[in-house]
Image (cartoon, helix red, strand yellow):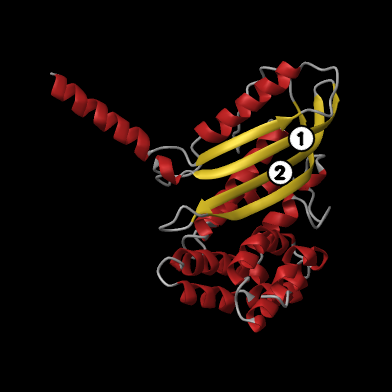
Amino acid sequence: MKIRFVCLFTALFSCCTLFAQEFNARLTVNSDKIEGTNKELYTTLQNDLNDFLNNRVWSDAIFENEERIDCQYVLTIDEAAGSSYSGSLQVSAVRTVFNSSYTTPIFNFKDNNVKFVYSQFDRLEFNVNNIESNLMAILAYYSYVVLGVHFDSYSRMGGQKYFDMAERISNLMGTSEDEGWKPFGSDHNRYALISNYQDAQLRGLRELIYEYHRMGLDMMTVNTDNAKSLILEVLPSLQTMNSAKPFSVALQQFAECKIDELVDIFRSAPANERQKVSEILQSVLPTRSKDFSDLTNSSY
C-alpha cells in the first residue's frame, strides 16, 4: 500500500509539474505617491494580480516549473480618486540562455498611461469575449506580448498566436477612453507596440529576435567566436528596419533591452566591430549614446 501511495503521489506531482503555468511573475504595486488611503487595498490588489498572472493558463504549451518565464511588473499609482486610479506599468521579462545560468532580457517596456477602476476585493478576472476591466485587459495584453517574444526567441515566428491574442485585445479595447489603446493616438502606446510586431515591414525584427537568441546567445557555450560573429552579422537588420520605419517602438524596445548585453559581448572585440555595434545602436537610440560609449573607448 505504501509503495502504491508513493507511486500515485509521484504521478500526481509529475503531472502538476508538467502542466505548470507559464509565468514566474512578481508584480509590485507602488502606492507611495498616494497619501491618506487604505494601504491594505493596495496589498490586496498586489496579491490578487500576482495570483492572476501566475495561476492562469495562458497557452497550450507545456512548461516545466524551471521553464516558467521570469518577469516583473511594477504598477505605480500616481493618482487616486475614489475607485479610479491612474499611473504607469513597467513590464520586464528574461529568458535563460542554453547551457548556462545567464539570463538575457527579452522585453522591457514602460506604459505611462494606465487607468483603471478598482474596489478592494473586486474579483479580478479576464475573458477576452467579455472584457470588463481595463486593468485586466492591460495585464493580459502584456502577458501575451511577453509570450510572443519568448516563443519567437526559440523558434522562427514561433510567437505568432500570442501576438495575435495581444492584437485582438488591443482591437477590442480600441473604442475605450484609454489613450493607451487608441489607434494612432501615440507612437509609443499599446496599439503602436503590437502593430509593430505584426507589421510586415518589421518582420525582420522577429527574425532578429530568433537569430540573436537561438543562433547567437544559445550557442555561446558551444563556440563563443561563432556566436559573436552571428550576432554581428544579423544586428545590422535593426539599422535597416529603423531606416525604413524610423524610431518604431518595438525596435527601440529591443535595442534598449540589449544595450548592456551588447556592450559586454563586444567590449573586448576589435575596434571595427565595436564601432559597427555602436553605430547600429546610435541609429535606433540616438539619445542613449552614453550607455554604449564603452564600445568606442580607445582604451579597449
- Horizontal placement of 4 versus 12: left or right? left
Q: Tell me if residue 237 can be seen.
A: yes
Q: Measuring 66% from the left and 61% from the top, which residue is drawn there?
A: 260
**Residue density around tag 2, few if under 14, some if 14–19, many if 20 or more, within 10 Å:** some
**Secondary structure category for the residue under label 1:** strand
Between discs 2 and 1, the one toward the N terminus: 1
Mark pair 2, 1: CA separation: 8 Å
- Image quarter of residue 277: bottom right
Q: Measured along the vertical axis of the image, is residue 293 above or below residue 154? A: below
**Secondary structure category for the residue under label 2:** strand
- Image quarter of residue 39: top right
- Horizontal placement of 10 versus 289: left or right? left
Mark 2 residue type: Gln
Marks 1 and 2: in contact by CB < 8 Å? yes
Closer to the camera, 26 or 273? 273
Q: Measuring 61% from the left and 50% from the top, which residue is drawn there?
A: 145
* Residue under label 2: 90
Name, please, the residue furthest toward the front.
299
Mark 1 residue type: Thr
* Residue under label 1: 76
